[in-house]
Amino acid sequence: MRKGAISLDGVLKAIAEYNDWGRDQFLAEYGYKPATGYLLIHEDRTYDSKAIAGVAHKFDQGRALRPDELSGGRSHAARWLARLGFVIRSSRDPDWTRDEIILACDLAMANDWKRLEYNDPRVIELSALLQTMPIHPEEVRTELFRNPNGVARKTVDITCRHPDYPGKPTNGNALDVAVLNDFLARPAEMTKVAQHIRDGLTAGEFQAVPPGAEEEDDYSAPEGRLLIRRHKSRERDKGLRKRKIDAVLRQGRRLACEACGFDFEATYGPRGTGYIECHHVVPLHEAGEGRTKLSDLALICANCHRMIHRRAPWPTPDELRNLIEETKRGEARIPSQHEPEPVTTEAVVAP
């Protein structure tokens, strides 16, 4: 039996059995506990997603999965059911993202790193703004999603981690501390980041994060996810990239990576002709939303592009090239473990 090999028909049969027996009997029969993470929504009714996915195996694979054979989270039940087109709703609000914490941290800093109360007008305004943020789809939001109480609580989690806080910190998370440290180290820069996120949300310029965009979580930059998505979207602008490539070719230059010198055509022949990626050298929180000049762009290979965006602060192509050259020089100085040590001979002087 292959775990996860369930069908739409199998799930519908499990739902029908759930309805016939009732929740308590269904869960007791198969040994499942009530869902604490994700719920399956079908025809305006909610179901325990882990139990439904596990029992669906009975109809598709001949045996129901035991509770200890799967998890109810995104790695198993919730993902399997969502893959079949079912709506999955979290029974608790999703974790705060970097973008949301940036806005909460900006508010805490404006309040001199003191906690804010749920009825503070600034907390109420931020609560309403966070509810417009497109990162979390509607189906994972509860009725209390980012309400003023939750926003006020997050400012407590942040401010109690400030170095000058005298009391015991709450059970926040590592991301709270990371964003707080960014604000303490670069307050002016992070204030700009927060303002750019606010402006984008207020203007409705941010689009919902599409399914399958998880690979962008590997990128770590001061902007947070929304601004880096916009940054990467601008880099993918085919018209802008083409104008940059045409300008380079008119100057008689090769389409080689400005960091490592990789040439797609030289390596892949006709298949690589005319191909290279385009990178905005200046991050959005510094460049703003003005018109992009060709001088703002750099042509780099996919590997160097990934390394630049990997974490903040972003190196420029020149800085990445220097890093590459330093690494190569360092490797040249280290003898191979299979290479014999050099032997020096000294003249023997007779007494």
Image (cartoon, rainbow, N blue to C red):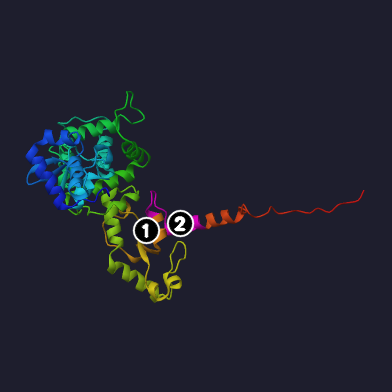
Callout 1 crowding tier (Cα within 10 Å): few <14, some 14–19, many ≥20: some
Identify which amino acid the numbered label 2 is placed on. Answer: Leu
- Between residue 334 and residue 278, name the one nearer to us: 334
Q: At x 35% / y 39%, what residue is drawn?
A: 178
Is residue 112 something that shows in the picture? no
Mark carried by residue 186: none
- Between residue 164 and residue 212, name the one nearer to us: 212
Regarding mark 2 in the picture, which secondary structure is present there? Answer: helix
* Coordinates of residue 140 in the picture (x, y in percent): 17, 43
Q: Quadrant of residue 305?
A: bottom left
Q: Is residue 348 left or right of residue 261?
A: right
Q: Is residue 66 left or right of residue 330?
A: left
CA–CA distance in space, label 2 to label 1? 12 Å
Which one is closest to the eye, mark 2 or mark 1?
2
Asked if residue 152 is among those painted magenta in the image, a careful observer would answer no
Q: What residue is pinned by disc 1? A: 281
Q: At x 12% / y 34%, what residue is drawn?
A: 25
* Coordinates of residue 281 in the picture (x, y in percent): 37, 58
Identify which amino acid the numbered label 1 is placed on. Answer: Val
* Coordinates of residue 255 in the picture (x, y in percent): 41, 70
In the image, the segment drawn in magenta is 308-324
Callout 2 crowding tier (Cα within 10 Å): few <14, some 14–19, many ≥20: some
Asked if residue 315 is among those painted magenta in the image, a careful observer would answer yes
Is residue 286 something that shows in the picture? yes
Mark carried by residue 320: 2
Q: Is residue 137 left or right of residue 285?
A: left
Question: Could you tell which of marks 2 and 1 lies nearer the N-terminus?
Answer: 1
Q: Is residue 106 left or right of residue 203?
A: right
